[in-house]
Every structure is written in C-alpha cells, then in structure tokens.
Image (cartoon, rainbow, N blue to C red):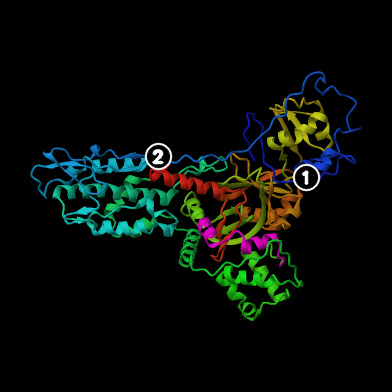
Amino acid sequence: MKMKTTTAIVALAVAGAIGMSTAPAGAATLLDFLKGNKAAQRSQQPFAGSLDDDTSAFPDPAAPAKPLPKVTGPKYNVYKADALRWIAASKFAVAGQTASAAPVEATGSIQTVSAPAAFDASAEPRAFMADVKVKAPAEVATAIETYYATHEGLLWVDANGVSAKARDAIAALADAGADGLDPADYAVTDPDGAVTDVDPAVRQKQLMQFEIELSAAVLTYVQDAQRGRIDPNRISGYYDFKRKTINLGAALTNVALSGDIKAYLVSRNPQNAQYQALKAELARLKAVDGEQEARVEVAPGTLIKPGDFNPELANVVAAIRQRGSDKLKLDHSLTLASYQGGADYAPEIVDLVKAYQTENGLKGDGVVGRGTVRVLSGGDSQGAKINKLVVAMEQMRWLPKDLGSRFVFINQPAFKAYYYNGGREQFDMKVVVGSKANQTYFFQDEIEIVEFNPYWGVPRSIIVNEMLPKLREDPSYLDRLGYETSVGGQQMSSTDIDWNTTDSVDVRQPPGSANALGQLKIMFPNSHAIYMHDTPQKKFFARDMRALSHGCVRLVDPKKMAAAVLDMSVADVDKQIATGKNHQVKAPERFPVYVSYFTAFPNKDGVVEYFDDVYDRDMYLGRALDATRKARHGQG
C-alpha cells in the first residue's frame, strides 16, 4: 500500500507474512517482522555472530545515528461540510414594478416588502422575487440563478397559487427517508396551507419565496440522491473518489417537463439490485422499529461447542429466532418449532447456528464463541442496523449508478471478494485485507493484468517501519534472506548500503514458494499500489476477523479468480505458473473492481448481511453527515 513519502521508490503493497527457511538457525527473519513476533526480534539484539568481518558498510560509530524515520498512512479528518450561500435573486427577478411608499408586513419568515401601489393580480409575479431570501449549496444556487435568468415562467406556482405538481414534489421530498436521506434537508412549507386572508401583494411574495425554496430543495435532493451528501475524500485519504458532477440545469428542465415528479425524484437514486435490497431492508426495519420484542442477549464469555451441554443455548436459539433472516427461519422451521429450550447442543441446533453464522459473514463452524455472541446480542440492534443501512446507501451513491454486468466486488468488513458476470454473482471467496494500522483504501478501478510468479517489491512502509531498525544493526540481513536490493536503480548488496539514507533504495523478493505474493497477483494499477494476490500464509483464512495484511487483498483461491479474470480454466492458470518465470498476461477485457467498505450489504439472494466496522469508518462517516446537517440548518 502506498504511504505518504517523499521518495520515488516503487512501493508495491504487500499483504503477506513471509516464512523464510534460508536464515541461519536462531536468526530473526522477515516473517518475524511481518507477523510482529517481538520475542524473536528481541532475541536477535544484537545479531551475535551473524555479521561479516567487513564492517565498512557501517556508519562511523563515533557519529550519532540518524533518527529512525517513520512512514504513516492517511489520517481521519474533522469533516468540513459544504457551506450554503444566498441565491442572488437579483439575477433573475423582473424589475420595473412601481412600489408603494407604505410597507406591507409579510407573515412567517417572509421579510417586509414594498408592495405595488395598485396591486394587479395579472402583473408579472417574478417582480416579487427581488427580495427572496433562500440559501442553498453553491452548485444549487448557481443552477437556480442561471435557470431563472434564462427561462420564463414558474415551475411550482400557477394562477391558483401552489400547483398540484408542487404538492407532489413536497410529498416526495418528505419521503426522502425511504432512501436513507434526511427529509429535513428538503422541507418546504406550503404557503397555501397557512392563513390565506392576507394582502394580495404579500401572498404573491410568499409564493415567489416558495417557488425558489422548492426549486432549491428539489435540486439539493437531486444532487444528494445521485452523488451523496458528503465528499468522502474529505474524511480521509483512505477514500479515493472523483466526486460526481451533476447537471443541475438539465435537472430543472427535466422537472419542468416531468409529468410525474415523484417518479423523477426517486429515479435519481441508484437503481442497481444491491441498492434496492438495502432500501427494502431499511423499510422493513423502520416498519418494526420500536415494536420489536425485548432484545435477547447471550451472556458475554459464552463458549459452546457441538455436543456440549449449556443452558445459555436457549438464549442462542431465541436470538436466532429474533434476528435470523426469514429465509433462514424457513429453512430451519422444523428445528425452531421443535426446540423446547433444552441445554443439549444437538446436531440440528448446530446446523441452525452454522447457517446463522454463515448468514452473518462468520465462519460456519457451529462454535458459539466471542464473534458469534457479538453478532447475536452485541452489535446488531435495530438502531445499529438502520444506521449501517443509511451509511451503506450513502456510499452506494459514490459508485456508478450501474455497477456493470461484469465486475469484482471486494467488501472489506465482510472479508470477501465476489465475482459477477452476466449481472449475477458467480462465486465468492474469503480475503484478508489491511490491518487497522495498514488499512485498505476504498476506491474503484479496472482489472487489467495477471502477473504469474511475481516479484514482491517491498513497500517503503515495511522497509522503513519494520526492517530498517534491524538493517542498521545488520546490513547483511537481506542478502542472507535472498532479497535483491538496489540504490537508484543499481543493484548492490544490502551490506554495501548505508541504511541511514534510504530514499532511493528498492528492495524486492524474487519469485518462489516463500514469496509474499505467492504464485500470482491480479493487478488494477492504482496510486495506492493495492492489488489482489496469493499468499503462502493460508492459516489466516481460518479466522473470522481477517484485517491482517499491509493493505493489499489476499485471496484464499487466487487461481479461481485469475481464471475468471482471464477467461481461462484453472488448469490453464496452473500451466502459466508452471513455467516458473515471472510474466504477465493481459485480461481479454478490462472490467471494474470495487475495493469497497460496507458494513451492511446484500448477498446474492438479496438478504442484507451486517458486518463489524473494523476501521471505524462508519463512525467517521456518521460525523460527516452530522456536520453536513448542521451546516445546512445553521447549527454549530
């Protein structure tokens, strides 16, 4: 993973811990660095008897050593929301009306205005826009100024006042919560719903205020629905999205032509199957929110293995009854109907628990341990699920409206990669993603190349943060492990490198059985040097929590994914590997890969699954949404 640095080193990110067999007995290996084996590392201070006699590469012991540098990843920021600005009504209000010397007081939030001396109901209503006071996001304000300056007439007001179309728009905006948006952001008061026995000039002014307020609300909704309310790149450098540009001028034209304003507004939201499943789940949860039976909780520290006898099993089954999907409860209806609250962990109950674990992204082993207990009673309350859905629907707006017919979708909190073709999921597989200290980014790109028998270019973050302290003590360390080192592109022994100056040093591991990238890597070239790859460390796939790498995505079955990417068989992939040579094969066609982060997402059956917020990103996104709400409503 690419970290902040001033060097030009090629930092190909690794996600693997390396088991080396070439180091002498008792010596710490790079495996110890990558696995954090501090005991093994401490045992090598100093590397007694492991140094060459030639010590010319060492810095002068009389000179003070340079402080050890540190390479760090992106930070999370205090989110700065978009500010609103006043719409310049003077750019489109019609001038030339004669004003009365006596002011007419408006009602509600409408400002005091000077009414025409002799009000004429047939007069140009836009003459009353001059003193309209409406704030909106900058792009919305500009679009409204341009539209009304270049188009005659009104969108929401007719000869009778507020039009039926306007009331349909108000109703649609009030239902914004169905799409995970905040209806308060688009609330507009119908002036005809208030007292109408007012001076005609005052009412005309109210109607013009309403006209611009509703246009601003509609455009804000259109923009939010299509690109989201926040700019994720402001949250952290771990997000990498080009924010969508919405043609708001065209939107107002479409609004003017639309015969079904509600359908038009709803259509601005993502329409893909994944988003629709999230929306349906949100509606389902809201329908029962506050009406759920008392939450069932499994006692913390509970551990139940198949065949055990444990009275806490009754709470386990009760929690599954409460929180399991309808499909799961249907598939295991006989077991659920016949269970009488016993403490015997019988095979049919084990199968029920396994299904529930799998449904929630856990290892389906039937062991009720900490992870299963957490899902059963800790982190998936009704409110927590709703929050995750709102966050997920916001994030879906950052992605293309149509994800495509063929794509790879990596969901970091699920620790899964999914391959889609023909618009349908063909398979999924376990992955290992970056640890919390070395997080995998959230972005999209295109798969281009599969590299077989790859070299591993050691990322600068690993060179500096993990290897450098030992290299200063023992510069021959990498030579002994068989790594290739170069300075400014010129290969040389690690012993001959002054490890006090590492800016132009490259380190790479040749192909082989112990290579950190295994037998292949699948590349979608990006500025973060993240890719999917094999790994010799297969044991990590047995864990439920697999945020363990240095940022790249390790695949449990890389050959299957490579075969899908290259439109070939696994046997053909094996032939490519069998050459033993480092080489690349281009994908027959490029297609998207979404390296994503969703704590709520539907599976191939449309059932929404919930996952832990391993990087706390939902929390930061929630803060950004809160900051946006406050900015829009003049708070804080």
Residue 132, given in percent of the width and then of the height, sits at 24, 42
Q: Residue at x 73, y 58 (%)?
A: 542
Tell me which label, 2 or 1, sits earlier in the chain: 1
Residue 254, given in percent of the width and then of the height, sits at 31, 52
Residue matched to label 1: 18
Residue 83 has which mark? 2
Q: Amino acid at mark 1?
A: Ile
Residue 184 horizontal side relative to residue 587, left or right: left
Q: Residue at x 42, y 40 (%)?
A: 82
Verify whether residue 373 appears in magenta: yes
Q: Amino acid at mark 2?
A: Ala
Quarter placement of the C terminus: top left
Which of the two discs, 2 and 1, sits closer to the camera?
Answer: 2
**Residue 422 visible in the displayed image:** no
**Disc 2 crowd, CA 10 A, few/some/many (<14, 14-19, 20+):** some
The magenta stretch is 366-388
Of the pair 395 and 568, the residue shown nearer to us: 395
Most extreme residue toward the left is: 118
Q: Gap between marks 2 and 1, in whole Å? A: 49 Å
Indicate the secondary structure of the residue bearing disc 2. loop
Q: Residue at x 72, y 25 (%)?
A: 501
Residue 428, given in percent of the width and then of the height, sits at 63, 59
Quarter placement of the N terminus: top right
Residue 562, given in percent of the width and then of the height, sits at 66, 53
Query: For residue 372, what is the image quadrant?
Result: bottom right
Of the pair 161 and 441, the residue shown nearer to us: 161
